[in-house]
Image (cartoon, rainbow, N blue to C red):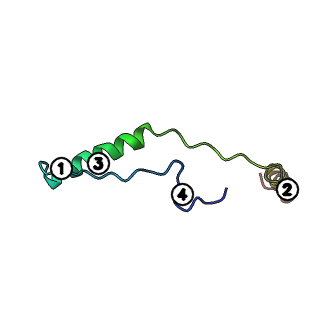
């Protein structure tokens, strides 16, 4: 699975509270609550589909390990 290098789909919104009546602490608390809400309600990450090449490589790797284990008395 290739890395995403910080690229999220859809990109996360930047949360800014612009109000002259709130204190910096209140604005930070509101922004933190919104961040937590977004995190908790985000859809679960989907597993990347495997290619046929990757499936075959995984199967071959498992079968090689099981053959080696019997040959050396391990397992």
In the structure shown, which secondary structural element does the residue marked by tag 2 occupy?
helix
- Are circles 3 and 2 on residues that touch, CB within 8 Å? no
The one nearer the camera, 41 or 21, is 21
Q: Which mark is residue 32?
A: 3
- Residue 7's x, y, as percent? 54, 57
What is the CA distance from the residue labelled 1 to the residue labelled 2?
Answer: 64 Å
Closest to the camera, between mark 4 and mark 3, is 4
- The residue shown at (22%, 48%) is 29
Q: What is the residue that sits farthest to the bottom in this orientation?
A: 5
- Residue 46's x, y, as percent? 60, 42
The one nearer the camera, 75 or 13, is 13
Give the mark nearest the N terminus, 2 or 4. Answer: 4
- Residue 53's x, y, as percent? 83, 53
Residue, disc 4: 7
Dot 3: within a 10 Å radius of its alpha carbon, few (fewer than 14), some, or many (20 or more) residues? Answer: few
Give the mark nearest the N terminus, 3 or 1. Answer: 1
Give the mark nearest the N terminus, 3 or 2. Answer: 3
In the structure shown, which secondary structural element does the residue marked by tag 1 occupy?
loop
Closest to the camera, between mark 2 and mark 4, is 4
Q: Which mark is residue 64?
A: 2
What is the CA distance from the residue labelled 3 to the residue labelled 1?
Answer: 16 Å
Dot 2: within a 10 Å radius of its alpha carbon, few (fewer than 14), some, or many (20 or more) residues? Answer: few
Quadrant for the N terminus, please.
Answer: bottom right
The one nearer the camera, 55 or 35, is 35
Residue, disc 1: 19
């Amino acid at each position: 699975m290739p890395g995403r290098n910080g690229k999220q789909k859809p990109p996360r919104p930047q949360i800014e509270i612009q109000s002259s009546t709130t204190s910096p602490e209140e604005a930070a608390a509101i922004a933190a609550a919104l961040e937590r809400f977004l995190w908790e309600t985000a859809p679960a990450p989907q597993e990347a589909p495997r290619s046929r090449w990757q499936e075959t490589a995984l199967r071959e790797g498992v079968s090689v390990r099981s053959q080696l284990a019997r040959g050396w008395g391990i397992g």
